Amino acid sequence: MLRIAIAAALLAATPALAQPGPPPGDQARLFLSPSGEPFRGQDGLADWFAGADADKNGALTLAEFRDDAMRFFKVLDADGDGQVDGPENSAYETKIAPEITRMDLGPGGPPGKRPLVRRTDKREPRVGAARFSLINEAQPVRGADADLNQRVSSEEWAKAARRRFEILDTDQDGKLTLDALRPRLAR
């Protein structure tokens, strides 16, 4: 009982973690684009795809995918200096997509109140942003920091967009379709 009280006190001391997440079942209403942009609604994947598909032909090319990523980079780069730094990343985690920092207690609530479930698959559990995205990447802004200097340059962001496109383009035909992406959310 003491351990639970200590854990509760620690969570309360961390504002981003202390905030309650959406009710069970509502988490599906959040979708994070491959760059981490949140879309909240009935079909966030379709909303993101429609906005990224600049020529409205039902397929995303690398150029469209990268352009969409760079558009969101400009949102993250609040001071316009060509880098997303620590304070801008903190704004992403606390204001733009705070759900990525919340603990996922799974179905049934906290430990002791939910049934034990044995994992039958060998895949890594999805944490952070990966719970709401097409790619298993816990924090998409930090994930783009290739040189690990705690800042993401526009060049690093563009390279991350290419890498993410290549991950999603499983048949390597140079395009992404909504129907091909949809099954990735079910993982």
Image (tube, grey):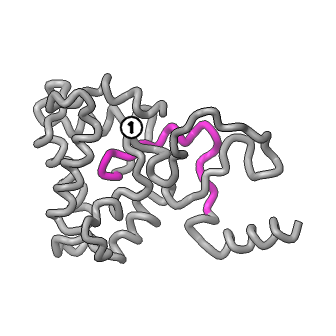
Decide whether residue 31 is among the magenta residues. Answer: yes
Residues rendered magenta in the picture: 19-36
Q: Could you tell me residue 71's position as x and y percent? A: 19, 54
Is residue 32 left or right of 99 when viewed as pictured?
A: left
The quarter of the picture where residue 155 lies is bottom left
Q: Could you tell me residue 22's position as x and y percent? A: 59, 48
Decide whether residue 8 is among the magenta residues. Answer: no
Q: Could you tell me residue 181's position as x and y percent? A: 33, 30
Q: Which residue is at the front of the view, 25 or 150?
A: 150
Q: Could you tell me which residue is drawn at 63 percent across and 33 percent down?
A: 120
Q: Which residue is at the front of the view, 40 or 141?
A: 141
Q: Could you tell me which residue is drawn at 18 percent across and 55 percent down?
A: 159
Q: Could you tell me residue 187's position as x and y percent? A: 48, 33
* Residue occupied by mark 1: 44
Outermost residue, front side: 122
Mark 1 surroundings within 10 Å by alpha-carbon count, few (fewer than 14), some (14 through 19), many (20 or more): some
The quarter of the picture where residue 9 lies is bottom right
Q: Which residue is at the front of the view, 122 or 114?
A: 122
Q: Which residue is at the front of the view, 27 or 122?
A: 122
Helix, strand or loop for disc 1: helix
Is residue 26 left or right of 167 when viewed as pictured?
A: right
Q: Could you tell me which residue is drawn at 31 percent across and 25 percent down?
A: 180
